[in-house]
């Protein structure tokens, strides 16, 4: 970095000093990088940030707001919007102004130190999603209803898909929560799109559930 | 011409009081940009580039980051290239990398606490030369030929990577460009999932000496082998996709079903400095990852493994095919003219647990 040279009374302004001063001024010119907007005026430079340009605001984007609270951007499963405590993710009037927050307190974590934020819903007799049952939960395992490790936890895969839960319930993981040794909880996003769902029934109450990016 | 030269030769600069000069200096110093929260500053020859912090930019799952790790115990290079991977998920579950510490290998999740006992899981890389010939072979006349090199993305030719070997049968002349002298190496990062497989498929001809002879096809399904975890990443110098056997292979009893479903996540290229002396990549090489998967994945087999071994199926042969040549018999069984062929195909498909990946 160039330093603007300091002067003392009686010093000559040599070409070298002038060049150094000029280079220092030139080196301080601001250049517009990613997510930043600069506007030059006679009185200075206005610096504005455009986080939206660099932060991917994907459907179901989960972010930790404070200890034990998470915000989830709105997303759709088969065109249906989940609720948190009876409020749609996009807000009470779906105007986007009052988004509900998932308040889970101390996160429920599984044996491997990880837990999930998941959508949970129930299917009807035809294995179709019941819209009013679509909600957001924080759970230690998305594939176990009572919080105990599922049979294949950490083991080999069997037939894949998301295993259903009793009562024609299913949970689709949205984010994994992991508690660090420092006590800090970090979050890993899982889906990045609105989702489509279909069940592959295996008997009266069991099914494999498939989720994939919804078209359109 | 330098601005200063112009000034010194054509202008007499009037005396500037030192206080005034220093006031300008102080004004200048007050204008020096300083990094605040969420912003990065990069000092360039043309000025200061102001950007939002990298951490706020989107980094997709499975993004590969290669780093050189210094290690004096590794001779003669004094270190090695390793790759870390931005956490990705399969069916919402963690994926692991095998990490060996003090002789003990552990499957470490990609989401592992970087400050924990295992640190950030890193894959140790091994390399192939995609520019070198794929080897020697013989042509239909029995002549020894040199196979062409695998090649690499066109981008690398623009940064001066040596041309790929065209092979001895190429109609193209070898590229002779002294400016393209950088070496290239490649390594594949692969995601594997264990899955069930049909271990044994047998075809038995019953009552072969009589007119009532029949053929019995049976399958023995084995559960998924126990891999390091549910899904894991491996670094391979050259990945070869697993191939499911054909129905004919299954009936002949020569089928070997893969016990993993695999997908190529990324290929990591290393490019040497110009005129590099040596063969092994060291710290002076530059990594270039090429990702093939950008989103988290789901995986499923089309077929759910049965809770019990499947019953064999039996077909009467009626003596027509008692030629004693098993391959001919198998071909007849699988022929579309055969009434039972669709039943046989369905039976065999029920024992094929190959799965598919899709993004979420």
Image (cartoon, coloured by chain):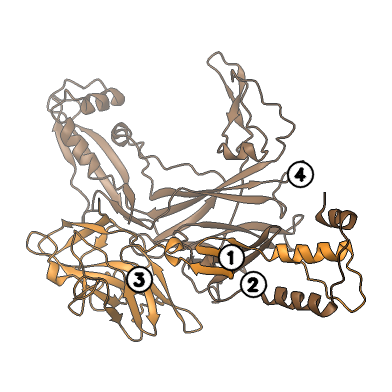
Q: Chain of mark 3?
A: A
Chain shown in brown: B
Category of crowding for the residue at label 3, using alpha-carbon neighbours closer than 10 angstroms: few (below 14), some (14–19), many (at least 20): many
Q: CA distance from mark 1 to mark 2?
A: 9 Å
Compared with B100, A97 (above or below) is: below
Q: Name the mark on residue A62.
A: 3
Q: Is residue B70 left or right of residue A69?
A: right
Q: Circle 1 is placed at which residue position?
A: B50
In the image, which is nearer the foreground, mark 3 or mark 1?
A: 1
| Secondary structure category for the residue under label 1 | strand
Q: Chain of mark 4?
A: B
Q: Compare residues B346 and A57 and report the one nearer the observer.
A: A57
What is the quadrant of the N terminus of chain A in the image? Answer: bottom right
Marks 2 and 4 share the same chain: yes
Q: CA distance from mark 2 to mark 4?
A: 44 Å
Which is nearer the N-term, disc 4 or disc 1? Answer: 1
Q: Circle 4 is placed at which residue position?
A: B278
Which is nearer the N-term, disc 1 or disc 2? Answer: 2
Where residue A214 appears, as percent x and y from the top left, is: 25, 54
Where residue B72 appears, as percent x and y from the top left, is: 75, 63
User: Which residue is painted at 61% across and 20% down in the image?
Assistant: B172
Q: Circle 2 is placed at which residue position?
A: B33
Q: CA distance from mark 3 to mark 1?
A: 28 Å
Q: Is residue B354 left or right of residue A94?
A: right
């Amino acid at each position: 970095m160039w330093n603007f040279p300091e002067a003392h009374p009686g010093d000559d302004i040599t070409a070298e000093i002038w060049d150094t001063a000029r280079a220092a001024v030139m080196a301080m010119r601001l250049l517009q990088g990613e997510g930043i907007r600069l506007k030059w005026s006679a009185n200075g430079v206005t610096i504005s940030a455009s986080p939206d340009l660099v932060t991917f605001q994907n459907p179901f984007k989960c972010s930790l707001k404070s200890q034990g609270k998470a915000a989830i951007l709105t997303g759709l499963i088969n065109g249906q919007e989940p609720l948190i405590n009876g409020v749609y993710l996009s807000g009470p009037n779906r105007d986007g102004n009052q988004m509900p927050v998932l308040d889970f307190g101390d996160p429920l974590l599984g044996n491997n130190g990880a837990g999930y934020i998941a959508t949970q819903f129930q299917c009807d007799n035809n294995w179709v999603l019941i819209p009013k049952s679509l909600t957001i939960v924080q759970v230690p395992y998305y594939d176990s209803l009572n919080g105990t490790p599922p049979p294949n936890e950490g083991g080999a895969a069997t037939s894949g898909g998301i295993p259903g839960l009793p009562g024609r319930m299913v949970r689709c993981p949205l984010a994994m929560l992991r508690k660090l040794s420092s006590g800090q909880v970090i979050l890993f996003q899982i889906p990045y799109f609105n989702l489509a769902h279909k069940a592959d029934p295996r008997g009266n109450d069991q099914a494999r559930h498939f989720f994939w990016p919804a078209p359109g | 011409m330098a601005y200063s030269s112009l000034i010194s030769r054509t202008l007499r600069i009037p005396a500037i009081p030192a206080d005034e000069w220093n006031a300008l200096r102080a004004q200048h110093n007050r204008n020096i940009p300083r990094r605040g929260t969420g912003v990065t500053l990069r000092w360039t020859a043309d000025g200061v580039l102001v950007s939002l912090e990298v951490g706020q930019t989107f980094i997709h799952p499975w993004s590969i980051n290669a780093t050189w790790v210094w290690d004096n115990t590794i001779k003669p290079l004094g270190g090695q290239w390793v790759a870390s991977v931005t956490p990705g998920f399969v069916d919402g579950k963690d994926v692991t990398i095998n990490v060996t510490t003090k002789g003990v290998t552990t499957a470490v999740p990609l989401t592992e606490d970087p400050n924990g006992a295992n640190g950030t899981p890193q894959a140790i890389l091994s390399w192939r030369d995609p520019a070198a010939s794929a080897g020697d072979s013989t042509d239909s006349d029995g002549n020894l030929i040199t196979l062409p090199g695998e090649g690499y993305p066109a981008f690398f030719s623009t940064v001066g990577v040596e041309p790929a070997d065209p092979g001895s049968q190429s109609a193209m002349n070898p590229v002779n460009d002294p400016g393209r002298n950088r070496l290239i190496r490649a390594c594949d990062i692969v995601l594997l999932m264990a899955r069930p497989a049909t271990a044994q498929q047998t075809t038995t001809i019953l009552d072969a000496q009589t007119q009532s002879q029949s053929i019995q096809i049976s399958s023995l399904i084995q559960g998924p082998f126990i891999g390091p975890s549910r899904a894991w990443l491996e670094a391979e110098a050259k990945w070869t996709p697993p191939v499911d056997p054909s129905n004919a292979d299954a009936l002949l009893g020569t089928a070997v079903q893969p016990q993993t479903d695999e997908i190529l996540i990324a290929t990591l290229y290393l490019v040497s400095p110009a005129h590099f002396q040596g063969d092994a990549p060291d710290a002076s090489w530059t990594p270039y990852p090429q990702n093939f998967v950008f989103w988290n994945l789901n995986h499923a087999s089309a077929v759910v493994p049965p809770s019990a071994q499947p019953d064999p199926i039996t077909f009467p042969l009626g003596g027509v095919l008692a030629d004693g040549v098993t391959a001919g018999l198998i071909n007849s069984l699988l022929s579309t003219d055969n009434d039972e062929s669709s039943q046989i195909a369905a039976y065999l498909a029920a024992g094929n647990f190959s799965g598919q990946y899709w993004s979420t």
